[in-house]
Structure formats: C-alpha cells, structure tokens
Amino acid sequence: MRPHVIFRYVGIVLLFNALFLLIAAAIAGFNHASDFFPLLYSAIVAVLFGVFPLLFVPSTTYISNDEGLVIVVSSWLLSCLIGVLPYILYGSELTFTNAWFESVSGFTTTGSSILTDVEALPLGLLFWRSATHWIGGIGIIVFVLAVLPSIGQAAMVLSRSEISPLAMDNFQHRTQKTLQILLVVYVGLTFLETISLRICGMDVLDAATHSMATIATGGFSTKNLSIAHFDSVAIEVVVILFMILSGVHFGLLFLAATGNIRKIWQSASVRYYIGSMAVGTLLVMLSIHEEIYIKWLDALRYAAFQIISLGTSTGFATSDTPVWPAFAILIMIFFTLQCACTGSTSGGIKAERMVIFWKSIRVRIAKLKHPKAIIPLKIEGAVVNDDVVTTSLLFIVAYIGIVFLATGFLTAFGVDLLSAFSGSAAAMGNVGPGFGMVSSLGNYSQLPVAGKWVLTVVMLLGRLEIFGIFLFFMVKTWK
C-alpha cells in the first residue's frame, strides 16, 4: 500500500470540504456574524491539509482495492474531524464530544443532534451543518469523482468502495457516467425542492438548508421544532414528495426523467418500498385516530409524515411521537430499521435486502414442502446469485446484532431501554430521532459522553454498510 497516494486523494476530499466551509464563512461575513472567523479558520486548515499532498505527490490513475478502501474510510473520518473545527472554535455548548457527535451525525446524514437550541446558532454555522448532510448524502467520494476529469481505474476502484454493489444494478454506464448521473439527479432534486419550498413560504436559507437535508435524507433543521415549526400542510406535502423521491434508486429516477418512467414501478424493491410505507401509514393512522387526533385527515397527515420520514431515514418531525400508542411506535421502529432503496441517499437495511429476505423465507418454505425440488430465488424474473442472497442475509444479521450490542452499551451507561434501543437503531440506520429521551422533538444532549461516542461509531458503521469499515481495520491482513 502506498501512503502518499492515499494522502493525495484524501487531500482532494479535504479541499472539497473547504469549499463549503468558505461558502458558510461568506454567509457569516455577509451577516456580520460571530461565526465568520471559526468558519474561515476551519476552511484555511482544510485547504492547507488538502493542498500539501497535491503539491508533493504526483498524480496516479491506478490504485489498488485496499488503497481504495483506505481512501474512502479515511476520507469519511477526516471529513468528520474537519467538521468538528467550526463547532469547537465557535464554542457555546459544543464541547469536543458534542462537536464530534454533531459532525458525524451530519456527514453520515443521521440527523441526531445534541443542540438544545438550534435556532441560537448563527446562519453560517446553520448552513455548514446542513452542508455536511449534503456532502455526505450522496457520498464524499462520489461527489469528488463526479466533478473531476476522468482518472481511469482509480474512479472505478473508489466508487466500488463507496457504493454498495446492490446499488449498481440499475446502471449500464461507465463509472464516470454513472457518477455524473448520480450528481445530476442529486443537484436537480435539491434545486427543485428549494424552489418548491420558497413557493410555499420558506425564506431562501430555510428552503435551501431543508432541501439539502431532505435530499440527503438527513433531517437537520434550522428550527428547534423541525418541520413542525412551519405548521404548513403545503410544506409538509413538498417535503413528503421529495423524501419519497430521495429514497428511490437515483438510476431509476434518471431513467424516469429521460422518459422511461415505467422502469420505476417495474422495480420490485420500489414497489415494496412504496407499498410497505403505505401499509405502515394506514396502520399508524388507525392507531393514533381518536386517541391522539380526532379528525381522520389529521391522523393521516401526521402518520404519513412520520412513517415516510423514518422510512426514508430522513428524520424530520411534525409531531411528538413518544406520546403515540405503543403499536404505532413499534411500526415506526420497524421502518427505522428498514428504510428505503439502495442507490439512494437513505440508510438502513434497505428495501432490496428486505425483498431478498422475504423471498428467501418463501423459497425455504417451498423447499420444505418439496425437499428434492430446485427452487431458485427470483426477483423481477431474474435468478439472484446465491452469494448475493447469503451476503444480504448476513448483512441483516450483522446489522441487527450491532443495534443490540449498542443498546447493551447504552443501557450499561444508565440509559433507559426504549431510548437505548431506538437511539441505536436510529444511529445504525442514519435516521436521527428515536423514542423516549431521544424522541422526534427532543435531542441527544442528555446521553452520557460514552454513549455519544458509541453512537458515533454506530453511525459510521451504518453509513459505510458495516463490512467496509470492518475491512478498513483489517487491511494489513489482506493477501
């Protein structure tokens, strides 16, 4: 492995972060706010650490698989570390632990926050906080590769390390073209939602930051009460629409935008994704009607928003869900674990793996009835490779195992069981809000310091889909 090559590519990523820090500093400077110098100093640090490798390390278009993995994981970790700087320099309640939690939560698009008063932050820091979502949403490496000139095999190796193999199934393009498609869809959705929210009455900064959070399926809001602050059906409908779109494979959205809209509904995972959220919304609506909301339309409004928000791993809120019936909470925890489709910005187990899981059960039952029969697992008429099935099922087992392990750690630190389990599930799925003390209109500030560190590790495991970060710490054992 060549450390100098790794430093060069990580340096490019740091420069990309510096660009957004400079934009945030410009916003702070324009408003003569106290966060100007923290943001500017952070941008300078990012530029310095990013430029030096580019000056002294020659360009190379070949990188090995282990170098690619180290570049990807190192880029995430160092981006989160750079993201800490403006918070630390600004001060207030942002200790190093809290700043690290907020930064990791932003870049992994989790949306969990330790801030007790979000609205007290200056505009520049609010923009940077949302920008971390937007940078991390589509993937730091994908962003960089999509805007750089072709760098040969390096782009293929890095994108393979960054993007789940399941997410590549709907692309029939070269690597660079695929990355550019992802970026075009990502930027396009952000622009369209920003315009839509402006029409619905949000100011420019709120519209932009909430759009960045929606399309990244992150959930950071500039308001303490999240989307509930606006109390607008029109805004909620716009956010719901773009949350649903952001949970669909971006390759399918690109095909739909270019005239092949039938491709979306032909996807088994999209049908499952939409259908499961429709059923979940119906069940929660029935559960909260009369007990929480007298009118059916109100029950539908709040049930749909919360299910779609959790089911896409966005984490916005319009209601204080901990007071909802236990059945409704149980349904929402299921969607916190499942989330949306691969190839989107969503976290969670993903709809594709859930489709494989349910079909595996059906195939197993059929084989028990007919032991000598050869019954392949098929999705959309195509036989799914046994390796894909095994890997998907192992991922689900590992995923649930990590959630329970994190729950055990949190309860050992004195956190109640509901808060510990839902908070761990929300961190692993990059969802954001849980229940109990970490509810939809609450925050994570009351967690012990050790608990916050545990959850940041879980967030990174969820964002890098478990196996990537495990391999990172085992690179030296590779042959």
Image (cartoon, rainbow, N blue to C red):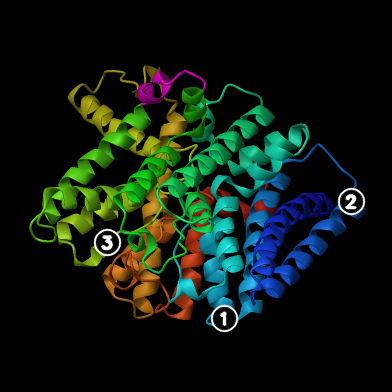
Residue 68 on image: x %, y %? 70, 45
Residue for badge 3: 319
- Nearer the observer: mark 1 or 3; the answer is 3
Name above or below for residue 25 compared with residue 381: below
- Above or below for 41 versus 380: below
**Does residue 262 belong to the magenta stretch?**
yes
Residue situated in front as seen by the camera: 179 or 418: 179
Say left or right for 34 vs 194: right
Q: Few, some or many C-alpha atoms within 10 Å of disc 1 (few <14, some 14-19, many ≥20)? A: some
- In the structure shown, which secondary structural element does the residue marked by tag 3 occupy? loop
Please state the extent of the stretch shown in magenta in the rendering. 258-267
Give the total of numbered labels. 3
For label 1, the residue is 95
- Height in image: 88 above or below 199? below
For the question of whether residue 47 can be seen, the reply is: yes
Q: Residues within 10 Å of mark 3 (few under 14, many from 20)?
A: some
- Looking at numbered disc 3 in the image, what kind of residue is underneath it? Ser
Which residue occupies the foreground of this view, 410 or 478? Answer: 410
Which marked residue is nearer to the observer: mark 2 or mark 3? Answer: 3
Quadrant that contains the C terminus = top right
Q: Quick one: label 2 or label 1, which is nearer the N terminus?
A: 2
| Cβ atoms under marks 2 and 3 closer than 8 Å | no
x 75%, y 39%: residue:
148
Q: CA distance from mark 1 to mark 3?
A: 29 Å
Residue 57 circle label? 2
Dot placed on the residue nearer the N-terminal end, 2 or 3: 2
